[in-house]
Structures are given as C-alpha cells and as structure tokens.
Amino acid sequence: MERSNEDLLPSLLFKLNDNQLALEAAILELSNWVEQRGSTDVANNVRGALEAIDKNEEFIKMTLSVMMAPE
C-alpha cells in the first residue's frame, strides 16, 4: 500500500519532535557539565534557551496526536 505525502507528514513531525527532545536532553546534560566547571551564567543561558522547547512540547504532542488519529 502506497502512502501519500499527506499520510507521511504526521510521522515525519513525530520523528522531528523526538529528535528535538533528544537534542534538548543532550544540551541540558552539557549545560550541567558546564555549570559544574564554574560557568553558571553560560549554563543558565542555555537552560533559558531550552525553555522554548518545554513551552511548546505539550502543544506539539497534542497536535501530533490529533494528526495521527484515525479518521
């Protein structure tokens, strides 16, 4: 069965969101490492930048679940 581009879009967005969350976790680990070495300001700046991912995560998950739900 061939999938249309429209059918692939929700799966693509789901995978991109997974990648984004994995990158967030990795960057957070790096910010913790930086902070342990005395660069608290840098670590806090990084965490502040990551807040956008946290703010948007619930909306993204909700939208993906709607897009992936069978009609």
Image: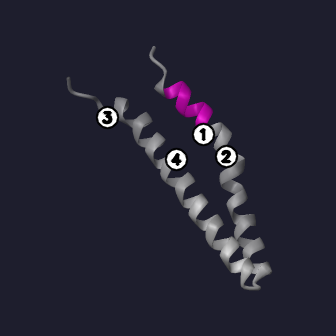
Task: Tell me the kind of residue under disc 1.
Answer: Ile
Number of the front mark, 2 or 3: 2
The secondary structure that dominates the magenta segment is helix
* Nearer-N-terminus badge (1/4): 4
Magenta-tinted stretch: 60-67
Q: Earlier in the sequence, mark 3 or mark 4?
A: 3
Disc number lying in front (3 or 1)? 1
Q: Kindly identify the residue that appears in the image at 50 percent across and 27 percent down.
A: 67
Name which residue type carries label 2: Asn
Give the numbered dot on residue 60: 1
Mark before the other along the chain sequence, 4 or 2? 4
Residue picked out by circle 4: 17
User: Of helix, strand and loop, which one carries label 3?
Assistant: helix
Q: CA distance from mark 4 to mark 2?
A: 10 Å
Instruction: Give the Cα separation between the discs numbered 2 and 3.
Output: 25 Å
Q: Say which mark, if any, is on residue 5.
A: 3
Q: CA distance from mark 2 to mark 1?
A: 6 Å
Q: Which quarter of the image is occupied by the N terminus?
A: top left
Look at label 4 and name its amino acid. Asn
Cα gap from disc 3 to disc 1, whole angstroms: 20 Å
Q: Are marks 1 and 4 in contact (CB under 8 Å)?
A: yes
Badge 2: few (under 14), some or many (20 or more) residues near its Cα, within 10 Å? few
Residue at (35, 35) in percent of width and height: 8
Q: CA distance from mark 1 to mark 4?
A: 8 Å
Q: Judge whether residue 18 is colored magenta.
A: no
Q: Position of residue 19 (x, y in %)?
A: 48, 53
Q: Position of residue 35 (x, y in %)?
A: 74, 78
- N-terminal label among 3 and 1: 3
As helix, strand or loop, the secondary structure at mark 1 comes to helix
Residue at 36%, 29% (x, y): give it: 7
Front residue of 12 and 44: 44
Residue picked out by circle 2: 56
